[in-house]
Amino acid sequence: MKKYMIAICLTLAILMLIFVLFTVLNRLVVYGASKADITKCAEEDSIDKKYEAIVVLGAGVRPDGTPSHMLEDRLKGAVALYKKGVAKAVVLSGDNSGEDYDEVSAMERYCLTAGIPKEAIIRDDIGFSTYETMYNAIVASGYRRIIVVTQEYHLYRAVYTGIRMGAEVDGYASDYRTYRGQSLRDIREYFARVKDFFAVNLSLR
């Protein structure tokens, strides 16, 4: 019985060590591959490249159909980039899966009000996840040079995923304020990063 318990403890310890090592490796690979390609909103003036499209990742909307703070800041960043002339197209990608929930229309209304012409806006109503958004923009739509707009914690995964899909992808971190509940988002991001790491490297969809 004692040997059996020792074997169980040893197995659990090995599994825990593998988990920790994979966590560290996964973070190093994803962050290392994408960090140099990310510009923070305070450094907007340093962007001197041209892209085929600005891709905005969706986020929550309020019951009245207006963007949440996080989504509003992503759109604010996209508007700034468009007016700077970095791309002629703005891809609005989000969840439009129900009659009572429509991220993309809220994003479109914001952009139109901010002065982006309707002909420059491309809707992606099936951007249900970061992976799906990048797939839709790069694989389905064929964009090869894009700049992705979202908050920094989320951006490393998006940029890494796009690069692994074969595109030239840069990121714009639209952190114009501090957001409540970030600790929970960081936990969710860990699991999403692991999921997308396997998906994009094993060519899963």
Image (cartoon, rainbow, N blue to C red):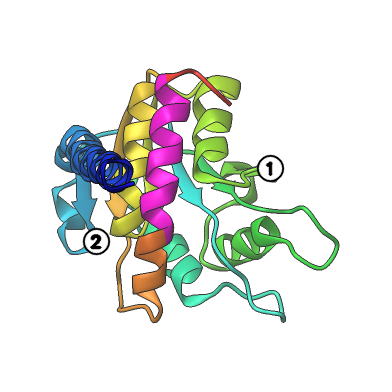
Asked if residue 199 is positioned above or below residue 108 in the image, the reply reads above
Crowd band around label 2 with a 10 angstrom C-alpha radius: few (<14), some (14–19), many (20+): many
Residue at left 46%, top 43%?
Answer: 55
Say which residue label 2 marks: 41
Sequence order check, earlier mark of 2 and 1: 2
Question: Which disc, if any, is residue 16?
Answer: none
Task: Give the secondary structure at mark 2.
Answer: helix
* Relative depth, front residue between 82 and 93: 93
Front residue of 202/100: it is 202
Q: What kind of element bears circle 1?
A: loop
Tell me the magenta residue range.
Answer: 188-201
Q: Is residue 160 left or right of residue 138?
A: left
Q: What secondary structure prevails in the magenta region?
A: helix
Q: Position of residue 107 (x, y in %)?
A: 60, 61
> Residue at coordinates 27% horizontally, 48% vertically from top-left?
2
The residue where tag 1 is placed is 126
Residue 87 can be seen, yes or no: no
In the rendered image, residue 148 lying in the magenta stretch gets the answer: no
Give the x, y percent position of residue 87: 40, 38
Whole-number angstrom distance, CA of label 2 to CA of label 1: 27 Å
Do we see residue 149 in this rendering? yes
Residue 192, position in %: x, y? 44, 47
Give the position of the C terminus as an image quadrant. top right
Q: Residue at x 19, y 39 (%)?
A: 21
Q: Which dot, 2 or 1, sits closer to the camera?
A: 1
Q: Is residue 191 above or below residue 48?
A: below
Residue 108 falls in which quadrant of the image? bottom right
Magenta-drawn stretch contains 197: yes
Q: Residue shown at 14%/39% (left/top)?
A: 36
Residue 151 lies, in percent from the top left, at 35, 60
